Image: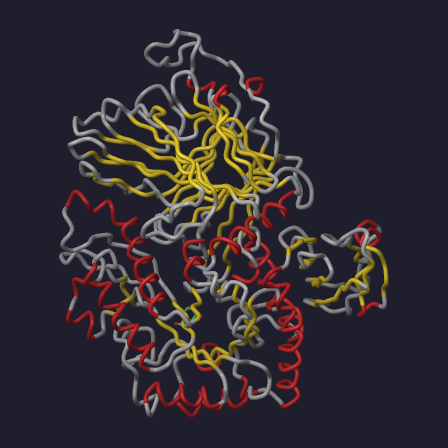
């Protein structure tokens, strides 16, 4: 890993694990993109520059008219107001009312260690280049941060926008980065969805104009993920170049790919500029969220492995990332809100001896919460349901040598709550208008410090006073009626980003006050599954839909970006509560074992044999957990495109792997299912005990094998592959 400035070429080279990123300062003084891809040598990249159409394009002052065109250079941080008509990364309204901007290179620094973003999650560590840009007239500056790593093929990018002037300006757009890619022969893959059907893969061809994904919900949301895969049309899961960009951000975002007139593609994005204006007083700066850009020449799978390594090695809380995960029994689908201490104890008793080590008490434990209509925000135990308070059930669970987890929805308030009655202004919205409901609840205005203090104090004291070991942090609605009581009129459009900052402050203060508590993120399932949340919470509930068949797609697409260990995956009952589908327990377990596994069903209703079976599943999971935590994922069959879902997880030293193969539907005369294994060492010899196969990695990966499925729908098999 190294960052070098080649003075004679005016070029910066950033060399990370197997990748090089190169940019240069052009004759005008603009930082221009030259290259991002597989590692190259520092031979100068003049031969990669082209002179395209310059006729009737703008020429910067001092340059030869007709010889210089903005469109002949790919921007590292595009700006609006002078001659660049491509999607800008920044739009500034100066105090004079004009929006002219001209960000020129000023200086650079190379830092051995990346400074953390204050108040926002970001990748930890990594050598960092900072390029300082400045508009000499308006005194607006931008610092571009680039970080490379020696253990993952990603580059982290962000910008800090600074007002060096002595009057306020207004930012109408403040993105994190721009980056060029040569040509337009790309397919753009994005993830869209909704409740219980998160992150569906969609791929469209790149074209002239803008392709974009965004959220306007003050949440990264399940509607469109903060991710874009940019894959040359010849790239497949296993072969070819693959680029991916994702934002480490949990509020309204945007990512765009623009097919520009030069025939190239420009990627940019960050905080959504829709309904956004940020006032930057003299001397102030605005930090933008970090973008992570991955590259692999091993296809889409390689891009995912680059992201997984980046998330595990540099983003997810290092205290927990490699730690064996709690195996939970969660009472939500067992009881919903209809429970009392005895019912909960019965669930705990029923799983004794299975290896399940954590009981999670979900929604309904506080105030008078028997339905969705009330009590959010009043984090006081409901003594009628929980006789003896939380303490009694916590102590009971602890006496069984299990950990105790508790559900909170810290950002929310019910209209029917003491909190709302006392502080109606704590809820987001205008006092003069009725607010929209979602799930009969409002969102607290966590952009306000007093509101955050209330949340931090109440949540922290429940955790501390009751010896809670695990917290499930839910967030069941998105923000509407954006208005923050007490904030100046000309700062109301800062809300969405201030919501993110408020959320991160809450996470920071609650997670840091409880260093031994394990946190799981949740948002009506997986509606806020992003890097920002994963920085604080090592895993996220992937979806309220735990049907094995639907989960093959949800987990497959989530794994495009996020490591398996970040996906919370439960085994639930049948018929499934979301879609009524019936699948075998073994299938549900095999799919849920491709993540941080757990259970969510009424175990008091299971037979002794079924409970014994849970014990066996937990034991099996424990045997392969190391692979889930640290292994490399190789996706083989894509359930969005086929009747099958097949994945392998291979240890880093390639001595061990598991293969999970799933078939959706069978028929009277099913096809022979052949697969070629992936990710093994071709020189090593392996044994697949379940099938009595001994063969080399070369044979298994080239000649492949046939999968033996029982002749049933929704059926899975798991093979363990070990080096001999
Ligand atoms: C959301 C979560 C569920 C459960 C309920 C409780 O829907 O995704 O897992 O916690 O809230 O209300």
Tell me: 537 left or right of 720: left
The answer to whether 363 appears left or right of 690 in the picture is left
Give the farthest residue toward the front: 112
| In the foreground, 237 or 326 | 326
Image position of 647 (left or right of 520): right
Identify the residue at horizontal 40%, vertical 90% (top origin): 341
Q: Is residue 211 left or right of residue 452?
A: right
**Relative to residue 540, is residue 702 depicted above or below?**
above
Say above or below: 699 vs 101. below
Report the number of discs: 0
Whether 82 is drawn above or below 399: the answer is: above
- Report the quarter where the N terminus lies: top right
Q: Quadrant of residue 611?
A: bottom right
The image quadrant where one finds ligand 1 is bottom left
481 or 591: nearer the viewer = 591
Residue 28 in the image: state x and y as whole percent. Answer: 38, 17
Where 152 sits versus 447, above or below? above
- Of residue 621 and residue 585, the one placed in the foreground of this image is 621
Q: Position of residue 418 (x, y in %)?
A: 19, 75
Look at the image and tell me in which quarter the C terminus lies. Answer: bottom right
Quarter location, residue 169 = top left
Residue 261 visible in the current orientation: no
Q: Position of residue 445 (x, y in %)?
A: 23, 59
How far across and how far down the image is residue 335, in percent? 45, 82
Front-most of residues 316 and 564: 316
Q: Is residue 117 visible?
A: yes
Which residue is at 34% across, 61% downward?
Answer: 508
Picture residue at 59% right of the left edge, 87% below the top: 353
How does the figure colour the protein chain or chains? secondary structure
């Amino acid at each position: 890993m190294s960052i070098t400035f080649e003075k004679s070429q005016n070029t910066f080279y950033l060399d990370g694990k197997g990748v090089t990123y190169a940019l240069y300062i052009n004759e005008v003084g603009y930082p221009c993109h030259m290259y991002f891809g597989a590692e190259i040598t520092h031979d100068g990249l003049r031969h990669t520059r082209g002179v395209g159409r310059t006729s009737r394009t703008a020429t910067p002052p001092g340059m030869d008219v007709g010889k210089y065109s903005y469109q002949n250079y790919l921007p590292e941080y595009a700006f609006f107001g002078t001659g660049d008509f491509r999607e800008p990364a920044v739009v500034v309204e100066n105090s004079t009312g004009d929006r002219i901007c001209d960000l020129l290179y000023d200086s650079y620094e190379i830092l051995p260690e990346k400074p953390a973003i204050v108040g926002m999650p970001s990748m930890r560590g990594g050598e960092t280049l900072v390029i300082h840009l400045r508009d000499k007239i308006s005194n607006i500056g931008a610092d571009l941060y680039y970080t490379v790593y020696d253990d993952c093929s990603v580059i982290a990018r962000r910008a800090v926008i600074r007002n060096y002037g002595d009057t306020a300006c207004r930012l109408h757009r403040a993105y994190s980065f721009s980056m060029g890619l040569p040509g337009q022969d790309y397919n753009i893959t994005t993830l869209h969805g909704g409740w219980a059907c998160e992150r569906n893969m969609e791929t469209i061809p790149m074209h002239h104009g803008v392709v974009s994904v965004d959220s306007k919900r003050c949440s990264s949301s399940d509607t469109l993920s903060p991710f874009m895969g940019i894959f040359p049309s010849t790239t497949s899961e296993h072969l070819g170049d693959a680029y991916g960009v994702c934002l480490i951000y949990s509020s309204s975002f945007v990512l765009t790919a623009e097919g520009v007139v030069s025939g190239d593609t420009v990627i940019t994005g960050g905080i959504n500029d829709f309904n956004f204006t940020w006032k930057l007083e003299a001397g102030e700066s605005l930090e933008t969220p970090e973008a992570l850009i991955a590259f692999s020449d091993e296809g889409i799978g390689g891009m995912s492995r680059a992201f997984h390594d980046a998330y595990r090695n540099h983003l997810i809380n290092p205290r927990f990332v490699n730690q064996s995960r709690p195996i939970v029994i969660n009472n939500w689908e067992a009881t919903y809100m209809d429970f009392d201490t005895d019912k909960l104890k019965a669930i705990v008793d029923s799983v004794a001896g299975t290896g399940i080590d954590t009981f999670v008490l979900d929604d309904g434990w506080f105030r008078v919460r028997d339905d969705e209509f009330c009590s959010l925000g009043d984090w006081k135990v409901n003594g009628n349901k929980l006789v003896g308070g939380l303490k009694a059930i916590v102590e009971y669970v602890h006496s069984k040598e299990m950990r105790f987890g508790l559900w909170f929805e810290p950002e929310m308030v019910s209209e029917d709550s003491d909190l709302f009655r006392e502080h109606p202004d704590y809820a987001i919205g205008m006092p003069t208008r009725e607010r929209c409901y979602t799930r009969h609840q409002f969102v607290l205005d966590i952009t306000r410090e007093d509101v955050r203090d209330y949340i931090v104090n109440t949540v922290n004291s429940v955790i501390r006073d009751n010896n809670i070991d695990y917290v499930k942090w839910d967030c069941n609605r998105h923000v509407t009626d954006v208005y923050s009581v007490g904030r100046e009129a000309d700062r109301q459009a800062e809300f969405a980003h201030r919501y993110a900052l408020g959320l991160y402050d809450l996470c920071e203060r609650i997670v840091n006050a409880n260093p031994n508590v394990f946190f799981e993120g949740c948002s009506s399932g997986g509606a806020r599954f992003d890097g920002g949340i994963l920085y604080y919470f090592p895993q996220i509930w992937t979806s309220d839909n735990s049907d094995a068949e639907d989960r093959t797609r949800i987990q497959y697409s989530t794994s495009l970006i996020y490591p398996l260990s970040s996906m919370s995956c439960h085994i639930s009952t049948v018929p499934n509560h979301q879609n009524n589908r019936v699948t075998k327990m073994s299938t549900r377990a095999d799919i849920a074992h491709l993540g941080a596994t757990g259970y969510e069903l009424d175990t008091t209703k299971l037979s002794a044999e079924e409970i014994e079976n849970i014990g066996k599943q937990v034991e099996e999971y424990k045997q392969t957990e190391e692979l889930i935590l640290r292994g490399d994922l190789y996706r083989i069959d894509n359930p969005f495109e086929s009747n099958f879902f097949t994945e392998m997880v291979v240890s880093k030293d390639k001595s061990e792997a598991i293969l999970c193969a799933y078939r959706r539907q069978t028929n009277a005369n099913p096809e022979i299912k052949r697969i070629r294994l992936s990710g093994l060492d071709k020189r090593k010899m392996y044994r697949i005990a379940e099938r009595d196969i001994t063969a080399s990695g070369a044979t298994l990966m080239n000649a492949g094998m046939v999968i033996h499925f029982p002749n049933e729908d929704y059926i899975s098999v798991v093979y363990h592959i070990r080096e001999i």
